[in-house]
Image: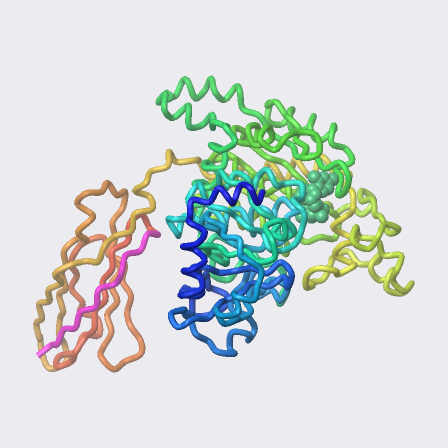
């Protein structure tokens, strides 16, 4: 590997001189450690000290220059999980002059993205915490291209999903333990440290019980863009896309329907569906479709994604494998099963994903509510839900409880006990939930881009006033359509108008189909009115509000 790097496209002596003269340079985005990504020239890493090193010289740059606030609590989060105290990044400082007494640095010529994977053993975490954030961090900085080098500093081994990380760039990612192979001191010519959190939608419950993030900033479009890019790298072509290109007619669609199938995800070690065969038969019969089974243990990841990418429905126990629902075609249904005493409302990473606007997935959950149909594993190790290590009383309480109370991550024994149960799925109740859930499945509109285009502001508002008598007046407001409307085919255009007497706290809202309106209710002469007008496309696409002020004389 050190050979690979020594074919440097950089002149060693030039690099060394630059480092000695200019030291390290850092410029970052973000006001807080939680939204910060830093770009460095000549950030170094001492494998001996297991620390990053910032070399100060007369021309080094450190922005933000936080002084010792850099340690409160850290410069930035190295993983996409917000403010997790095992995921902080910082560097040691040294004067560049110290380089004279240090081992000769090895320079890394590649533009490098340095990050922590959060939990590379778990497929959900791999996608949500690492792959999506790294993918979009790389889109954010154009020199993080296909030739970029990724460095994973969390200290874990490759893990079972390393092939997925390899898809992010053409260069082999480096692990922390491999850095020592490059010598005692390595310096990254150009590097970025940290991950964008823009695409994450779920928080795992470190500070408050798990749930969707408070301010989700990603839509299904970005998730699908990422999924398609990854499929491209895996040489999978989506059936759906091929169909579109052929411009399938109504009849062709009917024919295609005959090829529709349901995918059932099977787990083979924990959280089992005990009557999988029966479940499969019931699904096949109910929907008159083929049912195929998927298993992370038995099939390659690309072959699983190939199947999922054209499935009409994905059925699975709650668990990390459900992250693959991002590869389902638009209009597909996700059916998530929950073991006994586990409330689906409280564990919604996959529901949240399926429900992202533009994801166009239909989500249904089923919960085992029959205690006889659950198989518990009290004697397993605690991390697989065993409770034998607990006090007898606590064991009794857990066994008697039919609902896991809200809890924090990650070691709540009652939660682990219940989530690692195996389940005999009660077919009648399952089919009922499914049939019921399918009733509310919206028809997939042939996705029109225009359905996400927001109105511009309304323009050129005018006002005509007429004072009837000292107590009565009228106010006629008219406006022009938003500029972008003339280029769009919009099903329904409405205007929302608020009118407020200046100085008052309350306002009157109106929803109007036309571009003018005469207000006469509660309109007083010799008063100033504030009027807000905004355009609404198709009931829910709101435009910006324009504010106007009119005075009645
Ligand atoms: N896993 C699997 N089969 C099993 C149990 C787990 O493929 O029978 C995978 C699972 O998809 C995840 C990892 O092993 O990627 C860890 O599973 P765990 O049950 O710890 O996490 P969860 O699925 O609850 O997120």
> Quadrant for ligand 1?
top right
- The picture places residue 50, in percent across and down from the top left corner, at 63, 61
Residue 430 on the magenta span = no
**Corner quadrant of residue 458:** bottom left
Query: Is residue 545 shown left or right of residue 59?
Result: left
Q: Which residue occupies the foreground of this view, 407 or 343?
A: 407
Q: Is residue 245 above or below residue 267?
A: above
Image quarter (top left, top right, bottom left or bottom right) of the C terminus: bottom left
Q: Relative to 387, does residue 163 appear above or below in the rendering? A: above
- Residue 39 seen in this snapshot: no
Query: Which of 338/217 is in front?
Result: 217
Q: Nearer the viewer, residue 319 or 125?
A: 125
- Part of the protein shown in magenta: 540-553
Say left or right for 347 vs 394. left
Left or right: where 32 falls relative to 470: right
* Residue 227, position as x, y percentages in the image: 48, 39
Q: Which residue sits at x=16%, y=73%?
A: 549
Q: Is residue 187 left or right of residue 522?
A: right
Residue 222 visible in the shown view: yes
From the top left corner, tell me how far across and down residue 257 is, in percent.
Answer: 50, 22
Q: Quadrant of the N terminus?
A: top right
- Above or below — where is 138 with respect to 394? above
Q: Nearer the viewer, residue 353 or 188?
A: 188
Looking at the image, which residue sits at the far right?
392
Where's residue 175, x and y in %? 61, 49
The residue lying at 63 percent from left, 27 percent from top is 286
The residue positioned 38% from the left and 70% from the top of the image is 59
């Amino acid at each position: 590997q050190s050979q690979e790097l020594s074919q440097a496209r950089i002149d060693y002596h030039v690099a060394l001189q630059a480092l000695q003269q200019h030291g390290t340079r850092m410029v970052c985005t973000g006001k807080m450690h939680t939204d910060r990504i830093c770009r460095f020239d000549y950030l170094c890493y001492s494998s001996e000290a297991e620390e990053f090193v910032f070399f100060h010289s007369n021309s080094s740059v450190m922005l933000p220059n936080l002084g010792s606030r850099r340690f409160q609590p850290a410069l930035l989060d190295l993983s996409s999980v917000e403010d997790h105290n095992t995921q902080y990044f910082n560097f040691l400082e040294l004067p560049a002059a110290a380089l004279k007494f240090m081992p000769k640095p090895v320079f890394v010529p590649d533009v490098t993205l340095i990050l922590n994977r959060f939990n590379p053993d778990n497929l959900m975490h791999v996608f949500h915490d690492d792959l999506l954030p790294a993918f979009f961090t790389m889109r954010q900085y154009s020199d993080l291209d296909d030739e970029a080098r990724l460095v994973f500093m969390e200290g874990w081994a490759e893990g079972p999903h390393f092939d997925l990380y390899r898809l992010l760039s053409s260069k082999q990612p480096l692990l922390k333990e491999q850095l020592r192979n490059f010598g005692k001191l390595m310096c990254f010519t150009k590097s970025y440290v940290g991950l964008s959190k823009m695409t994450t939608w779920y928080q795992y419950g470190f500070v408050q019980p798990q749930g969707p993030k408070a301010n989700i900033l990603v839509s299904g479009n970005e998730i699908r863009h990422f999924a398609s890019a990854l499929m491209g790298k895996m040489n999978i072509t989506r059936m759906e896309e091929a169909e579109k290109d052929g411009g399938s007619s109504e009849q062709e669609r009917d024919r295609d329907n005959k090829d529709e199938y349901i995918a059932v995800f099977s787990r083979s070690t924990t959280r089992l569906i005990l009557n999988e065969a029966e479940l499969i038969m019931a699904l096949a019969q109910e929907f008159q479709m083929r049912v195929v089974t998927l298993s992370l243990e038995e099939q390659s990841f690309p072959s699983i994604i190939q199947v999922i990418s054209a499935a009409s429905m994905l059925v699975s126990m709650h668990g990390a494998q459900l992250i693959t629902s991002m590869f389902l075609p638009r209009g597909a249904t996700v059916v998530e099963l929950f073991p006994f005493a586990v409330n689906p409302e409280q564990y919604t990473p996959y529901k949240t994903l399926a429900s992202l606007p533009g994801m166009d997935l239909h989500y249904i959950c089923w919960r085992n509510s029959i205690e006889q149909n659950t198989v518990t594993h009290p004697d397993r190790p605690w991390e697989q839900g065993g409770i034998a290590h607990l006090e007898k009383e606590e064991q009794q309480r857990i066994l008697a409880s039919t609902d896991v109370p809200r809890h924090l991550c990650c070691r709540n024994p009652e939660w682990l006990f219940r989530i690692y149960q195996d389940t005999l799925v009660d077919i009648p109740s399952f089919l009922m939930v499914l049939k019921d859930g399918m009733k509310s499945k919206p028809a997939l509109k042939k996705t029109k881009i225009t359905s996400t285009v927001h109105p511009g502001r309304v323009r050129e508002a005018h006002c005509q006033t007429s004072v009837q008598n000292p107590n009565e007046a009228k106010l006629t407001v008219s406006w022009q359509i938003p500029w972008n409307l003339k280029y769009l085919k919009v099903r329904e255009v409405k205007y929302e108008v608020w009118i407020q007497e200046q100085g008052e706290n309350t306002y009157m809202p109106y929803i109007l189909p036309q571009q003018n309106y005469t207000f006469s209710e509660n309109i007083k002469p010799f008063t100033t009115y504030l009027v807000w007008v905004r355009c609404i496309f198709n009931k829910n696409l709101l435009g910006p509000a324009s504010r106007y002020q009119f005075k009645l004389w």
